[in-house]
């Protein structure tokens, strides 16, 4: 065990020493805020089939980590913001967290956990500083827990930040928000002393979505009529401009050379104007090609980000739509692991491969009964759509043009699938009916749910079955 860890540490020294010449890694974020979750093993196979070698998680779900055992995939596990208070106030809690969620997996043939994301965008402006004071104490506690388990050289602590942590109109003037200067100074000094990168999430889509003046072609990578001139540097895409704003901000603190990892970057495919398949493919492919070209940015020529994690692997249909309806549609794969568009991840295949052996519910849908008067349906629709996902129906969504009856059917079906096709969930006071004909129209897909409960359900029902057989057999023997 100890020997193995020494080998790991040795390997990691070799690997980190060579990162300047190595290609950036293209990883993915795997979130699970979904009504229809694929079995974790199906998702791991999907990543392996697509030669995705790095994955970022938002927590440390034991089922997910178990499915990654022996996969060879490098993992960033996450600590949700809500856990930071506890971890910052107790070394016993941080020891336990590391033992339960990291060290138990980092064994020969186990899970290759490389990073722990401590919090997720904890400095986000809209959090009004509520997590800020926990970050350094939590980092220090977790670091000593890692040291105790001999993992401190191998597993690195990082803090994924939203790009709203810094600001500037010109990249070279980049600076962290004044109220963050002190905490970020402590953070980068900590990261630097552990050889850990700065992790940042960058979203040109949001810049475009939130600002109607934002020049559309500046969000992409194919050249722009709105290049930003900054002294002798010219920026032709928002991603580089944003990244160099961070580089400048880090330089001001004395850490201009700190490696940078992009923790989240991507483009949604639905739920807003500008969120569509063409734009998402265009952005993600442009990004991947740009990063793999090793061009770097004007402030870091020849040095692309160390790794980037695409946001996201799969759609998460249960995410909050507070930021916008697009929030449920970031996946390069739909919720059921089907590739949404061709994408070359730079690992050999020009296209994405779909998930295999997906366990769908039966091919049936719930729709509005055409023979019924639907004038009193509004309340049913409201209830269906507040529980299930109807975001594609709205303006800019892929199902926006399917008409009033289509809207009702879509809502009924989303609810019915959410309820795992429970018969009563398609009743709606007699207005719904089950159909075996796929009601999808054009780009608007009426989903069929998937199940990840399969093994659990069947093991349980199998036990019941055996019990009944034994009871009948016992009765029969008794009666004889
Ligand atoms: C390990 O991580 C899981 C998932 O994030 C969490 O629910 C659990 O509380 C963690 N364990 C400890 C001891 O904190
Ligand atoms: C897709 O989005 C892009 C920009 O994000 C936009 O220019 C284009 O018009 C959209 N296409 C469709 C078909 O809506
Ligand atoms: C369908 O629902 C969406 C979202 O509520 C709405 O924008 C659209 O106008 C509706 N279509 C019809 C024909 O009622």
Image: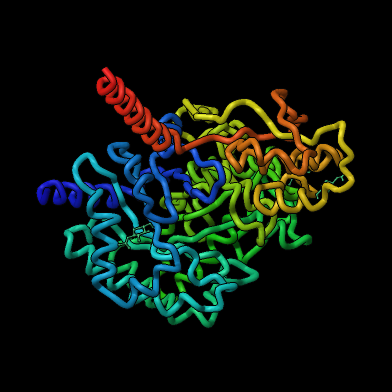
Q: Residue at x 37, y 33 (%)?
A: 464
Displayed quadrant of residue 472: top left
x then y, percent, for residue 260: 43, 58
Q: Residue at x 60, y 42 (%)?
A: 419
Judge by depth and name the residue closer to the eye, 343 or 83. Answer: 83
Quadrant containing the C terminus is top left
x then y, percent, for residue 22: 36, 44
- Ligand 2 lies in quarter: top right
Judge by depth and name the residue closer to the eye, 194 or 356. Answer: 356
| Residue 300 visible somewhere in the drawing | yes
Most distant residue in the top direction:
480
Q: Is 440 displayed left or right of 240 in the figure?
A: right
| Residue 218 visible somewhere in the drawing | no
Q: Is 221 displayed left or right of 244 in the figure?
A: right
- Residue 106, placed above or below residue 177: above
Q: Residue at x 68, y 31 (%)?
A: 365
Q: Residue at x 76, y 53 (%)?
A: 382
């Amino acid at each position: 065990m100890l020997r193995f860890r020494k080998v790991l540490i040795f390997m990691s020294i070799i690997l980190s020493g060579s990162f300047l010449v190595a290609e950036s890694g293209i990883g993915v974020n795997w979130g699970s805020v979904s009504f229809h979750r694929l079995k974790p093993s199906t998702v791991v196979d999907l990543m392996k089939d697509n030669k995705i070698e790095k994955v970022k998680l938002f927590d440390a779900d034991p089922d997910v980590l178990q499915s990654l055992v022996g996969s060879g995939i490098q993992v960033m596990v996450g600590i949700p913001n809500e856990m930071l208070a506890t971890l910052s106030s107790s070394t016993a809690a941080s020891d336990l967290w590391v033992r339960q969620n990291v060290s138990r997996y980092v064994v020969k043939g186990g899970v290759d956990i490389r990073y722990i994301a401590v919090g997720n965008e904890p400095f986000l402006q809209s959090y009004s500083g509520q997590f800020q004071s926990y970050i350094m104490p939590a980092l220090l506690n977790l670091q000593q827990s890692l040291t105790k388990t001999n993992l401190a050289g191998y597993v690195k602590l990082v803090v994924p930040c939203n790009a709203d942590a810094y600001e500037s109109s010109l990249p070279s003037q980049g600076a962290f928000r004044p109220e963050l200067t002190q905490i970020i100074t402590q953070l980068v000094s900590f990261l630097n002393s552990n050889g850990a990168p700065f992790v940042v999430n960058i979203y040109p889509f949001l810049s475009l979505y939130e600002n109607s003046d934002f020049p559309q072609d500046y969000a992409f990578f194919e050249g722009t009529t709105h290049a930003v001139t900054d002294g002798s540097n010219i920026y032709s895409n928002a991603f580089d401009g944003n990244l160099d704003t961070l580089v400048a901000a880090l330089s001001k603190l004395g850490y201009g050379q700190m490696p940078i990892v992009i923790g989240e970057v991507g483009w949604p495919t639905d739920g807003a104007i500008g969120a569509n398949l063409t734009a998402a493919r265009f952005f993600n492919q442009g990004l991947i090609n740009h990063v793999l070209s090793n061009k770097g940015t004007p402030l870091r020529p020849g040095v692309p980000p160390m790794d980037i994690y695409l946001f996201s692997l799969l759609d998460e249909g249960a995410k909050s739509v507070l930021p916008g309806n697009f929030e449920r549609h970031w996946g390069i794969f739909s919720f059921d692991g089907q590739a949404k568009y061709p994408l070359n991840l730079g690992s050999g295949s020009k296209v994405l491969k779909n998930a295999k052996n997906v366990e769908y519910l039966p091919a049936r849908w719930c729709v509005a009964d055409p023979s019924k008067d639907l004038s009193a349906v509004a309340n049913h629709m409201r209830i269906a759509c507040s529980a299930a996902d109807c975001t594609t129906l709205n303006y800019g969504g892929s199902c926006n043009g399917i008409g009033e009856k289509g809207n009702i059917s879509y809502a009924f079906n989303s609810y019915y699938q959410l309820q795992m096709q429970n018969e009563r969930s398609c009743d709606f006071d007699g207005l719904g009916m089950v159909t075996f004909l796929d009601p999808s129209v054009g780009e608007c897909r009426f989903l069929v749910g998937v199940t990840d409960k399969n093994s659990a359900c069947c093991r349980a029902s199998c036990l019941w079955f055996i019990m009944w057989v034994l009871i009948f057999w016992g009765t029969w023997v008794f009666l004889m």
